[in-house]
Image (spheres, helix red, strand yellow):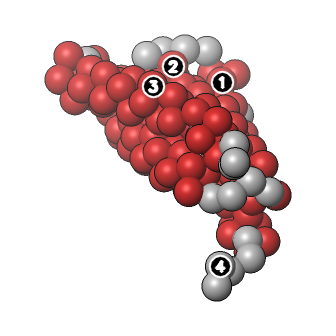
Amino acid sequence: MSNAPKNSRFPLLAASLAGFTGIVFGTLGAHYMKALLTERGMAVSWETGARYHLLHALALLGIAAWLRATPTGAGGALGLWAARCWVLGTVLFSGSLYWLALGGPRWLGPVTPLGGIILMVGWLLVAIAAAARRPQL
């Protein structure tokens, strides 16, 4: 029996939490804090954070489905690492943009591209996992 359902638990939980919080932050930025963000000139930064936040919630949902349907092996381990990268990358990338938009310390500026790099690493891990996966007959 495969442990794929167990491997899909983390990305599925992360997807649900990222989706929920992404909607919350997107709504806050579009409605409740719109004037503040516009006044600070940070509305676009907030929107970028929310967009990447929600995009990676969907990616996590996709990797959870892929892990659930994939037999165990190297692809599954890489898929889990991709999910971990997306969670960390989203926290660093989107989180730093949210915080900067609200007037957080400027030293957070370099955290944003670091988060972006971690997001990209996650996508590369998915590509490697897909290439390593043996086609089923």
- Residue 36 seen in render: yes
Q: Residues within 10 Å of mark 3 (few under 14, many from 20)?
A: few
**Which residue is at the front of the view, 94 or 101?**
94
Give how far apart the Cα atoms at labels 2 and 4 are. 46 Å
**Do the CB atoms of the residues marked 2 and 1 lie less than 8 Å apart?**
yes
Q: Residue at label 4?
A: 136
Residue 33 spot, x, y in % from top left: 25, 18
Mark nearest the camera among 3 and 4 is: 4
Foreground residue, 14 or 116?
A: 14
Question: Foreground mark, 2 or 3?
Answer: 3
Q: Is residue 59 left or right of residue 27?
A: right
Check disc 1 and report its element: helix, strand or loop. helix
Marks 1/4 in contact by CB < 8 Å: the verdict is no
Residue 17 marker = 3
Q: Residue at x 65, y 24 (%)?
A: 108
Image quadrant occupied by the C terminus: bottom right
Tag 3: amino acid: Leu
Q: Earlier in the sequence, mark 2 or mark 3?
A: 3
Amino acid found under the numbered disc labelled 2: Trp
> Marks 3 and 1, how far apart in space?
23 Å
| Residue 97 at least partly seen | no
Type of the residue with mark 1: Leu
The disc, 3 or 4, on the residue closer to the chain's N-terminal end is: 3
Q: Can you identify the residue that label 1 sits on?
A: 108
Task: Nearest to the eye among marks 1 and 4: give it.
Answer: 4
Q: Which mark is residue 99?
A: 2
Residue drawn at x 24%, y 26% as measured from the top left = 27
**In terms of secondary structure, where does tag 3 sit?**
helix
Neighbour class for label 4 at 10 Å: few (<14), some, many (≥20)? few
Among the two numbered marks 1 and 4 on one chain, the one whose residue lies closer to the N terminus: 1
Which numbered tag is attached to residue 45? none
Q: Position of residue 103 (x, y in %)?
A: 48, 15
